[in-house]
Amino acid sequence: MDGPVAGEARGQNTRLSDIVAVELGEGLAAAYCGRWLRLHGATVIKVEDATTGGDRLRREDLTPDGWRRTERRSMFAALHAGKESVSLDYSSDEGQSELHDQLFRADVVISSFTRDELLERGLSEVLFDLPGDRVAVSCTPFGLDGPYADYQATDEVLLAYGGSMSTLGQSKGPPRHVRVPMADFVGGVFGFQSALLGLLNPAAGRCFDVSVADCLAANLERVTMFYSHLGLIHLRGHGMHRHFAGHPGGLYPCKDGYVMVAMAGSPIQMMALLVEQPELEEHPLFQDRLERHRRPDEFDELILPWFLEHEAGEIVTKAHELRMPFGYVLRPSELLTDAQLAHRQSLVEVAVPGLAEPVRMPGLPYRYREFDAEGVALDPLETPG
Amino acid sequence: MTDETVTDETMSEEPIYQPLAGVRVLDLTGQYAGSQITRILADLGAEVNKVEAARHMDMVSRGLVPTDNRPTNHWWTRTAYWAERNINKRGITVDLTTDEGKEVFYDLLDVSDILAENYTPRVMRHFGFEYETLKARKPGLIHISLSGYGQEGPLANAPANAFGMLAAAGLAYAMGEPGPAPYLPTTSLADMYAGISAATSILVALRRVRLTGEGERIDMAGREGGMAMGSGFVLGSQLPPDQPGERVYSTVILGCAGDEEWLVVCYRDAEEWAQLCGVLGIEDPPDPPADPDDPPEEVVRAAAAADRHAVAAALQAAGVAAAPVQTGRDILLDPHFEERDVYALCRHTDPEIGARPFGRAFPVRVLGARGTELRDPPRDLGRDNREVFREVLGYSDERIDALYEAGVAADGPSTRFGRAWATPLDTEAMIHDGGALPAPDYLDVLSERFGERVGPLRWPEEGS
């Protein structure tokens, strides 16, 4: 697909501009679901509870060491950009009337309320009995039923229950926690998937109960497979990586940082060519895969000096020329100036209150190449109306 | 459903959730992310015809993790990776490098709604399968390409794999400790969510095709799937570093009784910290630690004697966010996931593999339906050739035989693979280095959990 792009190339589009979605509650998974609907051009109305001061992300924000109480609202701005805002009191007649007006306006209703919260707001009978072909998507930490349905959740708790945390950390050390939300994104994407399925084929089903923990647990590459097919409890760190993926592989230091070394089927002779020592092909550690596996440090001593003399850009470019799938090891801040992402216009701008310049967030990871010329407005969500 | 399989779902009264029944997919994907796209579509009821060639198999999937770590000569259909990636798909072989193979490809394209592939862009060009050519032949086609970095730009033709994409998505640094060093998790998160995200793009395109009749070209960048998941990292990198304000909650991870028994607790305040101490039997709780990564010694000692599941349940009953750090074993035995039917058995037709549990690729409960079905086990190479060629394409037996004679179709791998076995993992070394723990009673434990025999009905003979 070289040459001019037929349609737009940004991380947003107008494919669902005929859809109206109402987003109830304040869960991150529901917010991600609503965000992806908005990035496809849907009208998304975020309904906030007037009696609590609105979404908690108006008072809590992400920082490098976790969530803190602050009015900065960067995550709120990022997740809700382009959405419309409605604020109501669920306990009042006026609020219920407004709520029902919104629900009847919607093609898709997203809810982050747990079963108790649905009951409290008079929604337990309503959400899954919307008239016509309206689609209802509940996105909650553990789903609307099951033993953990009422459990308290954070991203860390979900990653722990869902199995991902057991893969994070060093071998023979404790698992680690990641300080920004990842689990809820997964629930949000499955929520979006559910909404689309409901729109596509409402007769097959139009009421969905998305559990973030279920989505994590069902999509664990290798982790459950190791138990069911090998009788091993899969853990983490170098002790797993090396023995699964073989050697060499992983993060290697270089002159100006790190590169991700990946062979993925490339003959080991390619490594000898990469490090400009073709004679290494005859070395016993290049000849014998198992021996290389048993003596990884000795093998690395053969190649590391070359890595340390070269910059990441040189190494990865040369590896790609040799069809070795090496990767750049980028800091999140480096994504902002990445030439490939700039070419694809992958980041979308979002205004954050108090910041002079808009921040950039990953947009949709895919592009539709046909028939789309318009972008989507991602104006900040203002004070609830 | 084939006559070879029986699934749990056949016993229930509600209909199986198959919203994509009637959708046909021409599947050229392989490895992890690409196969994830079509696994989701297949679970949702689409007819997925996965194309390989005897000389160009999906080697990453077919070569990884021999079932029960036993080598057999029939290795290409006996790996766990292959099984997980390819449930519910049909398997055919067509050598697309030949003129006859290209004819079969176009015939399949004519009767398919979706073409999915995860090559770098140069490969489809090499085949002569540029989108414009395909669109001219079939205007309503949805063609999705999932490559590492997208179809255009300076990295468009760069080779990519799971961890390369993860690192290039910023996740290696983002998941490291605060400080200078990057870090890799042991599962390929970018790959996984690339496949899941790509599947959503197809659903959007299907809706458009139904509304307008117009086809769609989708360009999915695998690393951007990882970036989307790590949106918070990208956002955080642009914010001023000095952000005052008290923590909403603090996270402590404690080792509990037993090997690899960890507990995570997210306490909001001193009261919840005291509840943790109380559950651990500490009568005079110390103050919450200034650094949650360095909890007081008496709390560490008390936790080391405690049952992580019991502590987490007690804290949750008191309204404190807590969880055991669950492993693959824990998840398969977890009562919540059992009640919500997240995992189900798929019964392999090979008695040396037997029934095994797999996650549902669309793990969402649907009101009024049973959820998706693990109806067909993963296929042997070329298993569905004759059925697809005859019933889908209308080929005569003579034409099918000619495809076999020309080597375009085949029922086994090319001799270029020799009698090589999928390499068993060095599990002893893995265990020694802390990458895994042994669980030799796994088949008995799983048989009890799923209420029927899990595992082989007979063990393979060495080298059979």
Image: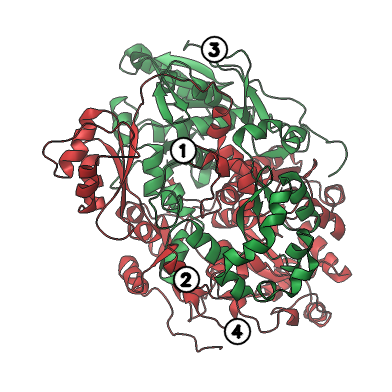
Determine the chain carrying the residue at label 4.
Answer: B
Q: Label 3 belongs to which residue?
A: A354
Q: Label 2 belongs to which residue?
A: B429
Chain letter tied to green = A
Q: Label 4 belongs to which residue?
A: B73
Residue A19's tag is none
Distance from Cα at disc 1 to Cα at disc 2? 35 Å
Q: Residues within 10 Å of mark 4 (few under 14, many from 20)?
A: some
Q: Disc 2 residue type?
A: Ala
Determine the chain carrying the residue at label 3.
Answer: A
Q: Quadrant of residue A177?
A: top left
Residues at badges 2 and 3 in contact (C-beta under 8 Å)? no
What residue appears at the point 21 percent right and 50 percent down from the top-left corner? Answer: B310
Numbered disc in front, either 2 or 3: 2
Left or right: where does residue A257 sit relative to residue A382?
right
Residue A184's tag is 1
* Residue sitting nearer the eye, B2 or A140: A140
* Residue sitting nearer the eye, A120 or A242: A242
Numbered disc in front, either 1 or 2: 2
What residue appears at the point 45 percent right and 36 percent down from the top-left corner? Answer: A179
Q: Residues within 10 Å of mark 2 (few under 14, many from 20)?
A: some
Find chain B in the image and tell me its colour. Answer: red
Q: Disc 1 residue type?
A: Asp
Q: Is residue A375 above or below residue B65?
A: above
Distance from Cα at disc 1 to Cα at disc 3? 26 Å
Left or right: where does residue B203 sit relative to residue B273?
right
